[in-house]
Image (cartoon, rainbow, N blue to C red):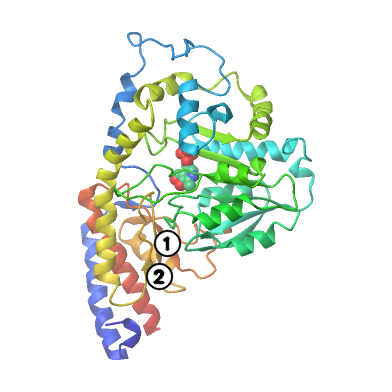
Amino acid sequence: MKYNEMSRQQLEQEFATVKKEYEQFFDLHLSLDMSRGKPGFENADLSEDLSCAVNRETGYKNADGTDCRNYGGLDGLTELKQLFGAILGVPSTQVIVGGNSSLNLMFDTIAQAMTHGVCGGKPWFTEEKRKFLCPAPGYDRHFGVTEYFGFELVTVPMTDEGPDMDAVEEWVKDPTVKGIWCVPKYSNPEGLTYSDAVVRRMAALRPAASDFRVFWDNAYAVHDLYEQGDSLLDFYAECERAGNPDLCLLFTSTSKITFPGAGVAAVAASPANISWLKNRMTYQTIGPDKINQLRHARILRNMDDVCAQMKRHAALLRPKFDCVLAEMDRQLADPGIARWSKPKGGYFISLYVPNGCAQRVWKLCADVGMVLTKSGATYPYGKDPDDANLRIAPSFPPVEEIARAAEVLCVAVRYAALEQLLS
Ligand SMILES: Cc1ncc(COP(=O)(O)O)c(C=O)c1O
C-alpha cells in the first residue's frame, strides 16, 4: 500500500515495524561504504598484469622505439594516443595522454584559462564575473573545481535526455558564462546517456563568449554493465559538422578500466585547442610517466582488449547493481516514496527520496555504520534545493555485503519518509 494512502494508525504501525528493523542494524556493528564510485578490490585485481608488463625482460621501449624511462614525449605514447583517440572519436594526433587523473587535466585546463586565457583570449581571472554551467544532479568534484576558481555555479536541470538544452541555450547568451560540465555517458549520478538531440544541440551552441568550452568528461565511455549498452553520438564529429570544432574539450581515463590510483588519463580536442594546451604543458613538465603509459599500452593493445576488460568488470559489478535495484523494488516500490535510475552502465544509481528527507536518510545510514555520498553533494555548493537526491555507489562493497547495504539504505528511506509523514 502506498504510504500516502495509509491512515495515521496504519502509518504508526508501519513506522513501529520499520523502526524495529532499523534498530537491529546497531547490533551488527556494520562498516559499509556506498559513498564513492570506487572499484572493488576484485575489479582492481583484473589489471594485475600491469605490475609485470614492463621490466628488464620486456624492455622499456614502445612501438616507436622510445625508451620510456627517459624524459620527453610531452603528449604521450603513440599507442595510447591511438587508443584514447578511438575511445573519444578524435584522430590520435589530437590527443594528449597525461598522468593518472582526468580530473587533474580538467583542473589544469581551467587553471590555464584563468591565468592565460583560452587560445589567445583574455585570462579569465581578469573578468569581474564568471559563471559555469553545472547540470545537476552532477559530479561534485566538477562543481568543486569551478567553485575553487571563484566561478558562480549555475544549476542547469537534468532531463531524461541530458541537460535541459533550452536552459543551456539561454544561458550561453550571457558572455560571462565560460563553460559547462558534461558527463555524457552513464552520467554521474543519473546513469543516463545524452540523447542524439542533446548532443547535436550542444555541438551547435553559439555562445556569446568565444572562449566558452564544453568540458565533455566521458569518464564512463566504455563502462557498460549489460550486453546491450547505451550509445552516445560522437561529440567531436558533431561539433565539426556544426562548424564548431573548438567548442569542445574531451576527457577520459582508465581509472575504472585499470587502476583509479595508477591509471592513465587523456584530453582530446581540435588542433587549435590541443596546441593551446601544449603551450602550458611545455612549461609544466618534461614528459608524463611513460612507464605507466607503456604498461597500459601493453595490456590494452586495442579496443578489443578494452572491451574484453570491460566485460570482466561488468561481470563483477552487474550483480551488485542488480542486488541494489532488486532491494529498491522490494522495499520502495509499494510505498511509492522514492524513484531511482536504472542505469545500463557507469558507477551510480541516482535515488530520489521525498523532498526534505535526503539528509535524514544519510544520517540514519551513517548512524548504523554505512557511509553514503553526502546528501546535497550532487548539486552546486553541496546544496540540493529539494533535499531529495542521493548518489548510490554500489561498486565498492564486496558482493557478500551489498545485500545488507541495500537493505540498510531502503529501511532508512522508509524510516525517514514515515517520520516525515507522521510529523
Ligand atoms: C564523471 C567523472 N569524471 C572524472 C572522475 C575522476 O576521474 P579520474 O580518476 O580520471 O581523475 C570521476 C570519478 O568518479 C567521475 O565520476
> How many neighbours does mark 2 have within 10 angstroms: few (below 14), some (14-19), or many (20 or more)?
many
Query: Does the numbered disc 1 mark a residue whose Cβ is under 8 Å from ligand 1?
Result: no
Q: Residue at x 60, y 18 (%)?
A: 286
Residue 165 appears in which quarter of the rendering?
A: bottom right
Residue 379 image label = none
Where is residue 146 shown, x and y percent of the image? 62, 48
Name the residue type under label 2: Val
Where is residue 101 shown, x and y percent of the image? 49, 35
Mark 1 = which residue?
Answer: 390
Mark 2 = which residue?
Answer: 353
- Tell me, yes or no, whether the two marked residues, 1 and 2, touch with CB atoms within 8 Å: yes
Where is residue 119 shown, x and y percent of the image? 73, 36
For the residues marked 1 and 2, what is the alpha-carbon distance in whole angstroms? 8 Å
> How many neighbours does mark 1 have within 10 angstroms: few (below 14), some (14-19), or many (20 or more)?
many
Label 2 secondary element: loop
Query: Does the numbered disc 2 mark a residue whose Cβ is under 8 Å from ligand 1?
Result: no
- Decide which of 14, 286 is in the foreground and name it: 286
In this view, the residue farthest toward the front is 241
Choose the circle earlier in sequence order: 1 or 2: 2
Above or below residue 208? Residue 297 is above
Horizontally, residue 351 falls left or right of residue 409, namely right
Q: Residue at x 55, y 36 (%)?
A: 104
Horizontally, residue 314 falls left or right of residue 388, namely left
Q: Residue at x 42, y 33 (%)?
A: 261
Horizontally, residue 242 falls left or right of residue 123, namely left
Above or below residue 349? Residue 69 is above
- Decide which of 18, 196 is in the foreground and name it: 196
Label 1 secondary element: strand
